Image: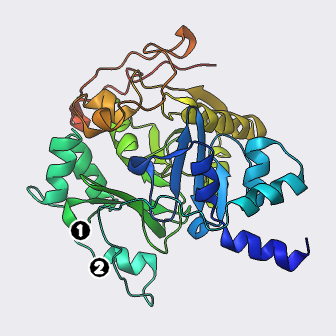
Amino acid sequence: MEKKDIDELKNRVACAAVLEKAGFAIDLKESTRKAVKYRRGGDIIIVIHQGRGWFDALSDARGDVLSLVEHLDGITFPEVLRRVSDLVGFVPTEPIWCRESRPHDSDLGAADRWRARRKPWRGSLTWRYLRAERGIPEAVIHAALRHDRLREGPYGSMWAAHLDNDGVVTGWEERGPQWRGFASGGGKVLFRFGPTNASRLCVTEAAIDAMSLAAIEDQRPDSLYLSTGGGWAPATVAAVHELSARLGARLVAATDNNRQGEVYADRLAAIAQEIGCGYERLRPVPGDWNEQLHPSSEIKREGEGKENPAAACPPSASRVKLRPRAAALDPADRRGGCEGGVRKG
C-alpha cells in the first residue's frame, strides 16, 4: 500500500471505531469534547485530535489509528492495515454531551477571558456547588478567591485557574453538576492553591481534590496544593520539575487511589529521583480526596462501578490518618502540625 493510500485510510477510520470494536466503552463522566476517555477493564485510552489521535493513560504509548491497533493487538503492520481497512464505513457511537460548545472571542487570550468572568460570591450557583455538592469549607473558598483562583462558570459550574510558574493564567478546569472540561483554547499547567514559596508540593489530579486535601489538612502553611487537571502535559511536567528543584522541596504524590493515580504517582516519584528532592506518596482512603472530605459528594455516585482495585485501607507504609470531614481552621487556630499525613523518608 502506498503512502497516500495509508494516509487516506487513517483519515477514513477514527480511533473510536477501533476501540468500540475492541470492547472499550466511553466513560462520559471522565471525558471532555477534546479528550474522550475509553475504558475496558483496567485499560484506559484517551482519544484526542478530533478522533485521529490517542494516548494510553497508563503508559507513554500514543499515536494514530494504525499505531492504536498495533498497541492493542501486538500484530504486524500488514495485519494492522487489513484490520483498519475492515473498519472503513463503521460509524462509532458518539458521546452525548450535556452542554453545547460555547463560542468565545478568539482574539482574547486565556488570561483576558479569565479576567472577564465574575468571582463566585456567597449564595451564587458556583458557591453553592462548591459548598453543598462538594463540601468545600468556606475558609478554603475564601482563600481561593483571595488568591484569584476561582471564577463563576456557566450553569453553576466552577472555573479553577491553571497558572504557569510566572503566575500567568493559561487555562482553567471547568467543573459543575452536569459538566466537566477544560478551557477551550487554554493550556494545562498547574492549578495552585497555597503559599507560592511552600516547600511541600502536593500534586493531585483535579482542582476540587487539591482544595479538598487542603481542607482536610487545615491548609498547612508549608504546603502548595496542585492539580494537573487530569492530564500530563509537557508544560505540567516542566512546571513540576521547576518547583521540585527548590531548596528543601518535597514532592507529594497525592493522586487518586486507583490504577491511574498510581501511574501518575510513579511519574512524580521519577521526577523526585531525577531532581533529588524529597518524595512522599499520600493516598486518600476512598477513590479521591473530595470523596474523603465529603462522602456524599457526587464523586462517590459517579465513581460507582469504576475501577478502583486499591484496598480501602492502603498499605501501612503509606496509610494516612485523616478526618473524613474537616472545616478549615482560622489561621490563628492552626498549630502547623502533620495531622494531614505521615511523612516518609
Q: Can the viewer see residue 261?
A: yes
* Residue at horizontal 51 percent and vertical 26 percent from the top: 282
Q: Which residue matches tag 2? A: 116
* Residue 82 or residue 323, whichever sits in front: 82
- Looking at the rendered structure, the secondary structure element under dot 1 is helix
Badge 1: residue crowd in 10 Å (few <14, some 14–19, many ≥20): some
* 102 up-or-down from 212: above or below: below
Residue 237 located left or right of residue 285: right
Q: Distance between the residues labelled 1 and 2?
A: 13 Å
What is the x, y in percent for residue 73? Answer: 77, 42
Image quadrant assignment for residue 23: top right
* Residue 72 or residue 179, whichever sits in front: 72
Badge 1 vs badge 2, beta-carbon distance below 8 Å:
no
What is the x, y in percent for residue 174? Answer: 36, 60
* 280 up-or-down from 255: above or below: above
Q: Can the viewer see residue 218?
A: no
- Looking at the rendered structure, the secondary structure element under dot 2 is loop
Q: Which residue matches tag 1? A: 154
Residue 96 located left or right of residue 272: left
Image quadrant assignment for residue 43: top right
* 52 up-or-down from 228: above or below: below
What's the amino acid at mark 1?
Pro
* Residue at horizontal 35 percent and vertical 45 percent from the top: 208
Quadrant where the C terminus is found in the figure: top right
What is the x, y in percent for residue 299? Answer: 31, 38
Badge 2: residue crowd in 10 Å (few <14, some 14–19, many ≥20): few
* Residue at horizontal 48 percent and vertical 62 percent from the top: 163
